[in-house]
Amino acid sequence: MLYSPTQTNAVIIGAGPVGLFQIFELGLLEIKAHVIDSLTEPGGQCIELYPDKPIYDIPAIPVCTGRELTNNLLRQIEPFDAQFHLGQEVTKLESQSDGRFLISTSQDNHFLSKTVFIAAGVGAFQPRTINLEGIDAFVGQQLFYHIKNPEQFANKRVVICGGGDAALDWAVHFSEIAASVTLIHRRDDFKAAPKSIARMRELCANHRMELLIGQVSGYEVKNDRLIEVVFTNIDGESKNIPLDDLLVLYGLSPKLGPIAEWGLDIDRKQICVDTAKFETSIPRIYAVGDINVYPGKKKLILSGFHEAALAAFAAAEYLNPEKQVQLQYTTTSPKLHKALGVKPPTFE
C-alpha cells in the first residue's frame, strides 16, 4: 500500500437526504463521518431531479422543495463537521484483516473505515447520453451533459435536447444571454414545473427561442468542430440546425455500479438488510434509503430517516463495545445540547 489512506470510524456513500441525515444520527452518538458522492454537490435526487418541485411528506414540514430540504439538512449537520468528497465514485470496497474496510474512489482517494453506510439512493447517477456514433469526441468541448459555467454559452447558438426541469430551466435562462436557443423534445409534453413550461411557451411565442418536436438524428462536422445537428420531426422530415454548442439534458440514469461487486446480498439491484440494524450481509456495512430492500420496504425519505437512526445505534454499539449506548433525547440531554451547540431549554 503506497498511499496513506484516511482513517475514520465511518464512511457514508451517498450525500442525498438520507445520507445527510445519517451524518446527523452518527453525530449525536459522537461518530464523525466522511461522505463520498458521485455528484458535485450534496442533495442526491432532490437536487439533481427536482430541486424546485414541492415535497409534501416530510414530517412537520407541510411543503418544501428538494433544494430547501437539502439546505435544511446541511444546516442541521453543521455541528458535526462531516468531511465531503464530492464528484467521485467509490470504485472498490475491500475487507481488511483487522476488520476495517479499505475504500477507494475514482479520484484516487482512499479511506480505512471501521463502518460503512451505503446511502446511495438507487445507485450512482450517470447522465443519459445521446446515441449518435462518434459524437462523444465533442464532450466537454461543444457537447455538454452538465452545465457548470453558464456564462460560457453567452452569445452562442445553443441547441438543447430534453423535456424535463433542467432542459426547460436552462432554455429559459439562455434565452436571455445566448445568440439563439433551440429546444428539441421528442413530444409536445414536458415533465417540468408548470411555471417553466408556461415561460418556455411564452418565449417561443415571442420568438425569443424555438421549440422543435422530434429528435436529433445526426450531425455535421467541419474543421473538427460541430457546426450543425440534423433534426428529424415526427413526420420523418429532416433539416439541419446550425449551432455552437449542444446541451443534452435527458436526465440522469441510476446505476448500481461497483456496489454489485462487493459481495453483498442483492435482490433486484437492491441491497438486502435486516430491520434491527439495517446491516447488510457483511457485518458493519449498513444500507439505508432507497438502496436497500426488506419485507414491507417503502421507498420514502421518511423511511430512510428511520433506517439511518437504527443503523447509527448499531454502529455505535460496535465502535464502543465497552459501554452501553444510551438513548437520549435532544429536548432534555445536556450532552446532546453540547454536541449541537445549543443552549439547554428553560421550563417555566
Image (spheres, rainbow, N blue to C red):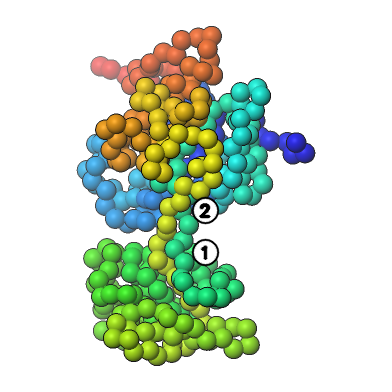
Q: Give the residue at x 61% y 34%.
A: 94
Q: Secondary structure at mark 1?
A: loop
Q: Is residue 31 visible?
A: yes
Circle 2 residues within 10 Å: few <14, some 14–19, many ≥20: few
Q: Residue 182, located in which quarter of the rendered image?
A: bottom left
Mark nearer the N terminus (1 vs 2): 2
- Compared across the picture, whether 66 is left or right of 2 comes to left
Return the residue nearer the eye: 288 or 22.
288
User: With respect to residue 65, does 341 lie above or below?
Assistant: above
Residue at the image position 33 percent from the left and 75 percent from the top: 185
**Of residues 61 and 331, the one drawn nearer to the viewer in this rendering:** 61
Q: Residues within 10 Å of mark 1 (few under 14, many from 20)?
A: few
Q: Could you tell me which residue is drawn at 51 percent across and 42 percent down? A: 259
Quadrant of the drawing holding the C terminus: top left
Q: Mark 1 — residue?
A: 148
Residue at the (46%, 61%) spot, across then down: 127
| Numbered tag placed on residue 40 in the rendering | 2
